[in-house]
Image: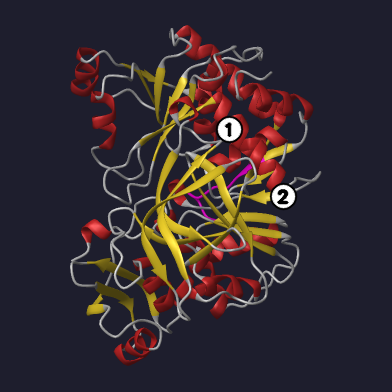
Amino acid sequence: MVSNYYALIHERLQQHLDDDLICWPDTTRPGLADMAYTGRAILTSVAAIRAELVRQRVQPGQQVVLALPVSFDLIGTLLASMALGAILVLPPAAARWALLRLLLRGDVTVLLTKRPLPAPLSWLGRLIGIRNIALDINSLPPAAPLPPQAVDPDQPALISHSSGSTGVAKAIRRSHRVLLAQHQALTEAFPPWAGQRDFPLFLNILLHNLALGTLSILPALPGFRLAGIAPERIVQQLVDQGVQTLTGNVYYFQQLLQYLHLHPTQFPQVRALGIGGSPVPEGLAGAIKTYFVNAAIYVIYGSSEAEPIAIRQLGTEPLAPRRGYAVGTVHPSLQVAIHPIGTLLLPGGKTYAVGEIAVKGPHVATPGNDWFMTGDFGYLDEADQLFLTGRRGNERLHQGVQHYQIEHVLTQVAGVERVAARATEQGFTVYVQGNASQQDLSVALATTFPETLINHLYFRSTLPVDARHLSKIRYDQLT
Protein backbone atom coordinates (compact mmCIF):
# COMPACT_ATOMS: atom_id res chain seq x y z
CA MET A 1 0.00 0.00 0.00
CA VAL A 2 1.22 3.54 -0.81
CA SER A 3 1.76 5.51 2.41
CA ASN A 4 3.45 8.58 0.91
CA TYR A 5 1.55 10.04 -2.05
CA TYR A 6 4.84 11.06 -3.62
CA ALA A 7 5.71 7.35 -3.99
CA LEU A 8 3.22 7.13 -6.86
CA ILE A 9 4.77 10.18 -8.54
CA HIS A 10 8.29 8.83 -7.94
CA GLU A 11 7.36 5.56 -9.64
CA ARG A 12 5.93 7.36 -12.68
CA LEU A 13 8.98 9.61 -12.99
CA GLN A 14 11.20 6.52 -13.11
CA GLN A 15 8.97 4.98 -15.78
CA HIS A 16 9.10 8.15 -17.93
CA LEU A 17 12.73 9.20 -17.57
CA ASP A 18 13.03 10.53 -21.12
CA ASP A 19 9.43 11.68 -21.61
CA ASP A 20 8.39 15.31 -21.18
CA LEU A 21 6.09 15.55 -18.15
CA ILE A 22 6.00 19.30 -17.50
CA CYS A 23 6.10 22.06 -20.09
CA TRP A 24 6.65 25.38 -18.31
CA PRO A 25 6.02 28.64 -20.19
CA ASP A 26 8.32 31.63 -19.94
CA THR A 27 6.08 34.54 -18.95
CA THR A 28 8.85 37.05 -18.27
CA ARG A 29 10.30 37.52 -21.75
CA PRO A 30 7.95 37.23 -24.74
CA GLY A 31 9.11 35.09 -27.61
CA LEU A 32 11.13 32.57 -25.61
CA ALA A 33 10.28 28.90 -26.01
CA ASP A 34 8.58 26.99 -23.22
CA MET A 35 10.85 24.78 -21.11
CA ALA A 36 10.16 21.04 -21.12
CA TYR A 37 11.12 18.86 -18.15
CA THR A 38 11.46 15.11 -18.44
CA GLY A 39 10.92 12.56 -15.72
CA ARG A 40 14.71 12.45 -15.31
CA ALA A 41 14.95 16.23 -14.93
CA ILE A 42 12.21 16.26 -12.30
CA LEU A 43 13.83 13.41 -10.36
CA THR A 44 17.18 15.22 -10.48
CA SER A 45 15.63 18.43 -9.16
CA VAL A 46 13.72 16.64 -6.40
CA ALA A 47 16.82 14.72 -5.29
CA ALA A 48 19.01 17.84 -5.06
CA ILE A 49 16.41 19.86 -3.16
CA ARG A 50 15.61 16.96 -0.83
CA ALA A 51 19.30 16.56 0.02
CA GLU A 52 19.52 20.27 0.85
CA LEU A 53 16.43 20.05 3.07
CA VAL A 54 18.02 17.12 4.92
CA ARG A 55 21.24 19.12 5.29
CA GLN A 56 19.13 21.95 6.74
CA ARG A 57 17.63 19.47 9.27
CA VAL A 58 14.07 19.50 7.94
CA GLN A 59 12.33 16.51 9.51
CA PRO A 60 9.42 14.28 8.46
CA GLY A 61 6.19 15.60 9.94
CA GLN A 62 7.38 19.21 10.13
CA GLN A 63 5.11 21.87 8.66
CA VAL A 64 7.00 23.67 5.91
CA VAL A 65 5.65 26.84 4.30
CA LEU A 66 6.51 27.22 0.61
CA ALA A 67 6.90 30.97 0.01
CA LEU A 68 8.65 30.63 -3.33
CA PRO A 69 7.75 32.30 -6.64
CA VAL A 70 5.54 30.16 -8.85
CA SER A 71 8.03 28.28 -11.02
CA PHE A 72 9.37 24.84 -11.81
CA ASP A 73 11.56 25.23 -8.71
CA LEU A 74 8.42 25.59 -6.58
CA ILE A 75 7.10 22.29 -7.96
CA GLY A 76 10.46 20.62 -7.34
CA THR A 77 10.53 21.92 -3.76
CA LEU A 78 6.95 20.79 -3.15
CA LEU A 79 7.77 17.28 -4.39
CA ALA A 80 11.07 17.14 -2.48
CA SER A 81 9.39 18.16 0.77
CA MET A 82 6.68 15.56 0.23
CA ALA A 83 9.31 12.90 -0.57
CA LEU A 84 11.00 13.75 2.72
CA GLY A 85 7.73 13.28 4.62
CA ALA A 86 7.32 16.94 5.57
CA ILE A 87 3.90 18.62 5.57
CA LEU A 88 3.59 21.19 2.79
CA VAL A 89 1.82 24.46 3.60
CA LEU A 90 0.73 26.73 0.73
CA PRO A 91 -0.21 30.30 1.80
CA PRO A 92 -3.62 31.73 0.82
CA ALA A 93 -3.82 33.39 -2.58
CA ALA A 94 -3.16 37.12 -2.91
CA ALA A 95 -3.57 37.93 0.78
CA ARG A 96 -1.09 40.54 2.07
CA TRP A 97 -1.18 39.57 5.72
CA ALA A 98 -2.09 35.92 5.24
CA LEU A 99 1.50 34.69 5.36
CA LEU A 100 2.18 36.53 8.61
CA ARG A 101 -1.01 35.15 10.18
CA LEU A 102 0.02 31.69 9.02
CA LEU A 103 3.46 31.98 10.63
CA LEU A 104 2.01 33.31 13.89
CA ARG A 105 -0.39 30.37 14.14
CA GLY A 106 2.30 28.32 15.88
CA ASP A 107 2.21 25.12 13.81
CA VAL A 108 4.82 26.11 11.23
CA THR A 109 8.51 25.59 11.98
CA VAL A 110 10.19 26.14 8.59
CA LEU A 111 9.76 28.87 5.98
CA LEU A 112 11.26 28.17 2.55
CA THR A 113 12.06 31.23 0.44
CA LYS A 114 14.14 32.03 -2.63
CA ARG A 115 16.18 34.70 -0.83
CA PRO A 116 16.95 35.21 2.88
CA LEU A 117 14.44 37.32 4.77
CA PRO A 118 15.53 40.83 5.79
CA ALA A 119 17.23 40.83 9.20
CA PRO A 120 14.28 42.19 11.25
CA LEU A 121 11.92 39.55 9.83
CA SER A 122 14.52 36.83 10.30
CA TRP A 123 14.95 37.83 13.97
CA LEU A 124 11.18 37.86 14.45
CA GLY A 125 10.98 34.41 12.91
CA ARG A 126 13.56 33.02 15.30
CA LEU A 127 11.69 34.56 18.24
CA ILE A 128 8.52 32.66 17.33
CA GLY A 129 10.40 29.44 16.52
CA ILE A 130 10.49 29.60 12.72
CA ARG A 131 13.61 28.93 10.67
CA ASN A 132 13.99 30.62 7.31
CA ILE A 133 15.76 28.47 4.72
CA ALA A 134 16.70 30.32 1.53
CA LEU A 135 17.03 27.86 -1.33
CA ASP A 136 19.51 28.79 -4.05
CA ILE A 137 18.30 25.89 -6.14
CA ASN A 138 20.45 26.56 -9.20
CA SER A 139 23.64 26.16 -7.15
CA LEU A 140 22.67 22.94 -5.35
CA PRO A 141 25.01 19.98 -5.98
CA PRO A 142 23.52 16.88 -7.61
CA ALA A 143 22.28 14.08 -5.37
CA ALA A 144 21.10 10.53 -5.91
CA PRO A 145 17.31 10.04 -5.94
CA LEU A 146 16.12 8.26 -2.81
CA PRO A 147 12.94 6.28 -2.16
CA PRO A 148 10.16 8.35 -0.56
CA GLN A 149 10.06 8.50 3.23
CA ALA A 150 7.39 6.20 4.64
CA VAL A 151 4.75 8.15 6.56
CA ASP A 152 1.45 7.52 8.28
CA PRO A 153 -1.05 7.68 5.39
CA ASP A 154 -3.29 9.85 7.58
CA GLN A 155 -0.56 12.45 8.10
CA PRO A 156 -1.34 15.66 6.20
CA ALA A 157 0.56 15.77 2.93
CA LEU A 158 -0.59 19.22 1.86
CA ILE A 159 -2.20 22.13 3.67
CA SER A 160 -3.72 24.58 1.23
CA HIS A 161 -6.31 27.30 1.74
CA SER A 162 -9.81 27.94 0.46
CA SER A 163 -10.55 30.85 -1.86
CA GLY A 164 -12.10 32.81 1.02
CA SER A 165 -15.33 33.47 -0.86
CA THR A 166 -17.35 33.35 2.37
CA GLY A 167 -14.89 35.51 4.34
CA VAL A 168 -11.52 34.36 5.71
CA ALA A 169 -9.62 31.65 3.80
CA LYS A 170 -9.60 28.42 5.82
CA ALA A 171 -6.86 25.81 6.00
CA ILE A 172 -7.57 22.54 4.18
CA ARG A 173 -5.59 19.50 5.30
CA ARG A 174 -5.34 16.67 2.80
CA SER A 175 -3.64 13.51 3.99
CA HIS A 176 -1.60 11.18 1.81
CA ARG A 177 -4.54 8.77 1.92
CA VAL A 178 -6.99 11.44 0.71
CA LEU A 179 -4.67 12.67 -2.07
CA LEU A 180 -4.36 9.11 -3.32
CA ALA A 181 -8.14 8.59 -3.16
CA GLN A 182 -8.77 11.87 -5.03
CA HIS A 183 -6.24 10.80 -7.66
CA GLN A 184 -8.04 7.46 -8.06
CA ALA A 185 -11.47 9.13 -8.26
CA LEU A 186 -10.28 11.49 -11.02
CA THR A 187 -8.63 8.61 -12.88
CA GLU A 188 -11.87 6.62 -12.84
CA ALA A 189 -13.89 9.62 -14.01
CA PHE A 190 -11.43 10.67 -16.73
CA PRO A 191 -9.32 7.69 -17.87
CA PRO A 192 -5.97 8.86 -19.29
CA TRP A 193 -4.37 7.61 -22.49
CA ALA A 194 -0.78 7.22 -23.64
CA GLY A 195 0.59 10.44 -25.08
CA GLN A 196 -2.16 12.63 -23.61
CA ARG A 197 -1.35 16.36 -23.70
CA ASP A 198 -3.13 18.12 -20.84
CA PHE A 199 -3.40 21.85 -20.09
CA PRO A 200 -4.24 22.13 -16.36
CA LEU A 201 -5.05 25.33 -14.51
CA PHE A 202 -5.18 23.80 -11.02
CA LEU A 203 -2.27 22.50 -8.90
CA ASN A 204 -4.12 19.33 -7.89
CA ILE A 205 -4.42 18.36 -11.57
CA LEU A 206 -0.68 18.89 -12.11
CA LEU A 207 0.06 16.52 -9.21
CA HIS A 208 -2.57 14.11 -10.54
CA ASN A 209 -0.92 14.17 -13.98
CA LEU A 210 2.53 13.50 -12.51
CA ALA A 211 1.08 10.48 -10.69
CA LEU A 212 -0.25 9.25 -14.06
CA GLY A 213 2.84 10.01 -16.12
CA THR A 214 0.78 12.45 -18.23
CA LEU A 215 2.30 15.57 -19.77
CA SER A 216 1.16 18.87 -18.20
CA ILE A 217 1.49 21.92 -20.44
CA LEU A 218 1.04 24.86 -18.09
CA PRO A 219 -0.82 28.02 -19.16
CA ALA A 220 1.26 31.15 -19.66
CA LEU A 221 -0.03 33.09 -16.65
CA PRO A 222 2.44 35.49 -14.99
CA GLY A 223 2.89 34.26 -11.43
CA PHE A 224 0.12 31.77 -12.24
CA ARG A 225 -2.42 34.49 -11.37
CA LEU A 226 -5.58 34.70 -13.44
CA ALA A 227 -5.67 38.49 -13.21
CA GLY A 228 -2.68 38.60 -15.57
CA ILE A 229 -4.19 36.40 -18.27
CA ALA A 230 -3.33 37.27 -21.88
CA PRO A 231 -5.91 35.24 -23.84
CA GLU A 232 -3.97 35.53 -27.10
CA ARG A 233 -1.00 33.76 -25.48
CA ILE A 234 -3.20 30.98 -24.12
CA VAL A 235 -4.84 30.48 -27.52
CA GLN A 236 -1.41 30.30 -29.17
CA GLN A 237 -0.32 27.65 -26.65
CA LEU A 238 -3.42 25.56 -27.34
CA VAL A 239 -2.60 25.60 -31.05
CA ASP A 240 1.19 25.24 -30.92
CA GLN A 241 1.24 22.56 -28.22
CA GLY A 242 -1.53 20.40 -29.70
CA VAL A 243 -3.42 20.40 -26.39
CA GLN A 244 -5.95 17.54 -26.15
CA THR A 245 -7.53 18.14 -22.74
CA LEU A 246 -7.83 21.20 -20.54
CA THR A 247 -9.42 22.43 -17.33
CA GLY A 248 -10.20 25.90 -16.07
CA ASN A 249 -12.73 28.03 -14.25
CA VAL A 250 -15.50 30.36 -15.40
CA TYR A 251 -13.39 33.54 -15.50
CA TYR A 252 -10.63 31.77 -17.45
CA PHE A 253 -12.98 30.50 -20.16
CA GLN A 254 -14.89 33.78 -20.29
CA GLN A 255 -11.63 35.59 -21.05
CA LEU A 256 -10.78 33.08 -23.78
CA LEU A 257 -14.26 33.40 -25.30
CA GLN A 258 -14.05 37.20 -25.42
CA TYR A 259 -10.83 36.91 -27.40
CA LEU A 260 -12.10 34.10 -29.64
CA HIS A 261 -15.22 36.10 -30.49
CA LEU A 262 -12.94 38.73 -32.05
CA HIS A 263 -10.34 36.26 -33.39
CA PRO A 264 -12.24 33.04 -34.24
CA THR A 265 -10.09 29.93 -33.89
CA GLN A 266 -11.14 26.31 -33.63
CA PHE A 267 -9.35 23.58 -31.69
CA PRO A 268 -10.43 20.28 -33.27
CA GLN A 269 -7.66 18.37 -31.49
CA VAL A 270 -9.18 19.04 -28.04
CA ARG A 271 -11.07 15.93 -26.91
CA ALA A 272 -12.29 16.95 -23.45
CA LEU A 273 -12.68 20.17 -21.48
CA GLY A 274 -13.57 20.57 -17.80
CA ILE A 275 -14.97 23.65 -16.06
CA GLY A 276 -14.98 24.02 -12.27
CA GLY A 277 -14.03 26.25 -9.37
CA SER A 278 -17.40 28.05 -9.15
CA PRO A 279 -20.98 27.69 -10.45
CA VAL A 280 -20.94 27.24 -14.25
CA PRO A 281 -23.56 29.18 -16.27
CA GLU A 282 -25.55 27.00 -18.66
CA GLY A 283 -24.84 29.26 -21.64
CA LEU A 284 -21.07 29.02 -21.22
CA ALA A 285 -20.91 25.48 -22.58
CA GLY A 286 -22.67 26.31 -25.82
CA ALA A 287 -20.33 29.22 -26.41
CA ILE A 288 -17.29 27.01 -25.74
CA LYS A 289 -18.55 24.34 -28.14
CA THR A 290 -18.38 26.86 -30.99
CA TYR A 291 -14.59 26.74 -30.85
CA PHE A 292 -13.87 23.37 -29.19
CA VAL A 293 -15.96 21.53 -31.74
CA ASN A 294 -14.90 17.95 -30.94
CA ALA A 295 -14.61 18.30 -27.17
CA ALA A 296 -16.77 16.59 -24.58
CA ILE A 297 -17.53 19.39 -22.12
CA TYR A 298 -17.83 18.63 -18.41
CA VAL A 299 -18.93 20.58 -15.37
CA ILE A 300 -16.76 19.35 -12.48
CA TYR A 301 -18.18 20.17 -9.05
CA GLY A 302 -15.92 19.72 -6.07
CA SER A 303 -13.66 21.43 -3.59
CA SER A 304 -10.15 20.95 -2.27
CA GLU A 305 -11.66 18.82 0.51
CA ALA A 306 -13.60 16.61 -1.92
CA GLU A 307 -12.50 16.47 -5.55
CA PRO A 308 -14.62 15.52 -7.42
CA ILE A 309 -18.09 15.57 -5.83
CA ALA A 310 -20.19 15.43 -8.99
CA ILE A 311 -19.58 15.48 -12.75
CA ARG A 312 -21.92 16.42 -15.54
CA GLN A 313 -21.25 15.98 -19.25
CA LEU A 314 -23.13 18.73 -21.03
CA GLY A 315 -25.53 17.74 -23.78
CA THR A 316 -26.84 19.65 -26.75
CA GLU A 317 -29.91 21.02 -24.94
CA PRO A 318 -29.28 23.43 -22.04
CA LEU A 319 -31.27 23.04 -18.84
CA ALA A 320 -33.48 25.83 -17.52
CA PRO A 321 -31.36 28.23 -15.41
CA ARG A 322 -34.38 28.70 -13.10
CA ARG A 323 -33.60 25.25 -11.67
CA GLY A 324 -30.18 26.37 -10.41
CA TYR A 325 -26.76 25.20 -11.53
CA ALA A 326 -26.85 21.56 -12.66
CA VAL A 327 -23.66 19.73 -11.64
CA GLY A 328 -24.61 16.16 -12.51
CA THR A 329 -24.27 12.81 -10.81
CA VAL A 330 -22.56 12.46 -7.43
CA HIS A 331 -19.38 10.37 -7.62
CA PRO A 332 -20.25 6.71 -6.86
CA SER A 333 -17.75 6.42 -4.01
CA LEU A 334 -19.43 9.25 -2.08
CA GLN A 335 -22.45 9.41 0.18
CA VAL A 336 -24.47 12.62 -0.15
CA ALA A 337 -27.00 14.19 2.21
CA ILE A 338 -29.11 17.33 1.97
CA HIS A 339 -29.60 19.11 5.31
CA PRO A 340 -32.94 20.79 4.57
CA ILE A 341 -33.72 24.40 5.41
CA GLY A 342 -36.94 24.69 3.41
CA THR A 343 -38.76 23.93 0.18
CA LEU A 344 -37.73 25.03 -3.28
CA LEU A 345 -40.66 25.85 -5.57
CA LEU A 346 -40.20 25.56 -9.34
CA PRO A 347 -42.61 26.68 -12.09
CA GLY A 348 -45.45 24.22 -12.54
CA GLY A 349 -45.65 23.59 -8.80
CA LYS A 350 -42.81 21.07 -8.51
CA THR A 351 -41.10 21.22 -5.11
CA TYR A 352 -37.85 19.91 -3.65
CA ALA A 353 -36.35 19.85 -0.18
CA VAL A 354 -33.38 22.20 -0.36
CA GLY A 355 -30.50 22.48 2.06
CA GLU A 356 -26.77 22.37 2.61
CA ILE A 357 -25.01 19.61 0.69
CA ALA A 358 -22.89 17.23 2.77
CA VAL A 359 -20.64 14.46 1.42
CA LYS A 360 -18.71 11.61 2.96
CA GLY A 361 -16.31 9.08 1.47
CA PRO A 362 -12.72 7.98 0.91
CA HIS A 363 -11.65 11.05 -1.07
CA VAL A 364 -13.14 13.58 1.38
CA ALA A 365 -10.69 15.38 3.66
CA THR A 366 -12.40 15.37 7.06
CA PRO A 367 -11.18 14.13 10.45
CA GLY A 368 -12.27 10.56 11.11
CA ASN A 369 -14.02 10.19 7.74
CA ASP A 370 -16.78 12.48 9.01
CA TRP A 371 -19.33 14.32 6.86
CA PHE A 372 -18.04 17.37 5.00
CA MET A 373 -20.41 20.32 4.91
CA THR A 374 -19.72 21.89 1.52
CA GLY A 375 -21.17 25.34 2.20
CA ASP A 376 -23.25 24.92 -0.97
CA PHE A 377 -27.03 24.59 -0.89
CA GLY A 378 -29.06 22.63 -3.38
CA TYR A 379 -31.24 19.61 -4.07
CA LEU A 380 -31.35 16.24 -5.80
CA ASP A 381 -34.01 15.77 -8.47
CA GLU A 382 -35.91 12.56 -9.35
CA ALA A 383 -32.99 11.34 -11.47
CA ASP A 384 -30.51 11.95 -8.62
CA GLN A 385 -29.00 14.90 -10.48
CA LEU A 386 -27.51 17.48 -8.13
CA PHE A 387 -28.39 21.17 -8.49
CA LEU A 388 -26.77 24.12 -6.68
CA THR A 389 -29.10 26.92 -5.58
CA GLY A 390 -27.26 28.89 -2.90
CA ARG A 391 -24.16 29.52 -0.82
CA ARG A 392 -23.71 29.56 2.95
CA GLY A 393 -24.14 33.05 4.35
CA ASN A 394 -26.64 33.98 1.65
CA GLU A 395 -28.88 30.92 1.76
CA ARG A 396 -32.15 32.51 2.89
CA LEU A 397 -35.18 31.32 0.88
CA HIS A 398 -37.87 33.70 -0.33
CA GLN A 399 -41.02 32.39 -1.99
CA GLY A 400 -39.26 29.09 -2.66
CA VAL A 401 -36.27 30.71 -4.39
CA GLN A 402 -32.55 30.94 -3.55
CA HIS A 403 -30.04 33.45 -4.90
CA TYR A 404 -28.16 31.21 -7.38
CA GLN A 405 -31.39 30.72 -9.33
CA ILE A 406 -31.80 34.47 -9.81
CA GLU A 407 -28.15 34.90 -10.76
CA HIS A 408 -28.23 32.02 -13.22
CA VAL A 409 -31.29 33.43 -15.01
CA LEU A 410 -29.73 36.89 -15.29
CA THR A 411 -26.39 35.59 -16.62
CA GLN A 412 -28.31 34.69 -19.79
CA VAL A 413 -29.22 38.35 -20.41
CA ALA A 414 -27.06 40.05 -23.04
CA GLY A 415 -24.49 42.42 -21.56
CA VAL A 416 -24.35 40.86 -18.09
CA GLU A 417 -20.75 40.24 -17.02
CA ARG A 418 -21.38 39.35 -13.38
CA VAL A 419 -24.48 39.29 -11.22
CA ALA A 420 -25.14 38.85 -7.51
CA ALA A 421 -28.44 38.46 -5.66
CA ARG A 422 -28.22 39.06 -1.91
CA ALA A 423 -30.98 37.80 0.33
CA THR A 424 -32.51 40.38 2.68
CA GLU A 425 -35.38 40.26 5.18
CA GLN A 426 -37.95 41.08 2.49
CA GLY A 427 -36.56 39.46 -0.68
CA PHE A 428 -33.47 39.87 -2.85
CA THR A 429 -31.33 42.83 -3.80
CA VAL A 430 -29.70 42.32 -7.20
CA TYR A 431 -26.36 43.79 -8.31
CA VAL A 432 -25.29 43.73 -11.97
CA GLN A 433 -21.91 44.35 -13.59
CA GLY A 434 -21.98 44.98 -17.34
CA ASN A 435 -23.87 46.96 -19.96
CA ALA A 436 -27.17 45.06 -19.91
CA SER A 437 -30.27 47.22 -20.16
CA GLN A 438 -32.52 47.56 -17.13
CA GLN A 439 -35.49 46.72 -19.31
CA ASP A 440 -34.00 43.39 -20.43
CA LEU A 441 -33.15 42.51 -16.84
CA SER A 442 -36.61 43.46 -15.61
CA VAL A 443 -38.26 41.36 -18.33
CA ALA A 444 -36.11 38.33 -17.44
CA LEU A 445 -37.03 38.67 -13.77
CA ALA A 446 -40.74 39.32 -14.39
CA THR A 447 -41.14 36.33 -16.71
CA THR A 448 -39.30 33.92 -14.40
CA PHE A 449 -39.91 34.86 -10.76
CA PRO A 450 -42.74 36.12 -8.52
CA GLU A 451 -43.39 39.84 -8.88
CA THR A 452 -42.51 40.79 -5.30
CA LEU A 453 -39.29 38.74 -5.05
CA ILE A 454 -36.81 41.49 -6.03
CA ASN A 455 -36.54 44.57 -3.79
CA HIS A 456 -33.91 46.54 -5.69
CA LEU A 457 -31.73 46.23 -8.79
CA TYR A 458 -28.44 48.13 -8.87
CA PHE A 459 -25.70 48.50 -11.47
CA ARG A 460 -22.06 48.44 -10.34
CA SER A 461 -18.84 48.97 -12.29
CA THR A 462 -17.37 45.86 -10.64
CA LEU A 463 -18.56 43.20 -8.23
CA PRO A 464 -16.25 41.80 -5.53
CA VAL A 465 -14.90 38.31 -6.26
CA ASP A 466 -12.45 35.90 -4.63
CA ALA A 467 -8.73 36.39 -5.24
CA ARG A 468 -8.02 32.90 -6.58
CA HIS A 469 -10.74 32.03 -9.08
CA LEU A 470 -11.99 35.57 -9.83
CA SER A 471 -15.32 33.80 -10.29
CA LYS A 472 -16.91 33.53 -6.83
CA ILE A 473 -18.92 36.52 -5.63
CA ARG A 474 -17.92 37.96 -2.24
CA TYR A 475 -21.44 38.56 -0.91
CA ASP A 476 -20.03 39.98 2.32
CA GLN A 477 -18.45 42.84 0.35
CA LEU A 478 -21.45 43.87 -1.76
CA THR A 479 -22.42 47.52 -1.40
The numbered disc on residue 362 is 1
- Compare residues 58 and 352 and report the one nearer the observer: 352
Residue 25 is inside the magenta segment? yes
For disc 2, the neighbor class at 10 Å (few under 14, some 14 to 19, many from 20) is many
- Compare residues 269 and 364 and report the one nearer the observer: 364
Residue at label 2?
197
Q: Is residue 429 left or right of residue 93?
A: left
Which numbered disc, 1 or 2, marks the residue that appears first in the sequence? 2
Asked if residue 265 is positioned above or below residue 173 in the image, the reply reads: below
- The residue sitting at 59% across, 40% down in the picture is 206
Q: Which kind of residue does numbered mark 1 sit on?
A: Pro
- The residue sitting at 20% across, 16% down in the picture is 123
Q: From which residue to which does the magenta span run?
A: 22-30
Instruction: Calculate the distance from the C-alpha at mark 1 to the C-alpha at mark 2.
Output: 28 Å
Q: Which kind of residue does numbered mark 2 sit on?
A: Arg
Q: Quadrant of residue 12?
A: top right
- The residue sitting at 36% across, 90% down in the picture is 443
- Looking at the magenta stretch, what is its main secondary structure? loop
Q: Position of residue 47 (x, y in %)?
A: 61, 17
Asked if residue 192 is positioned above or below residue 88 in the image, the reply reads: below
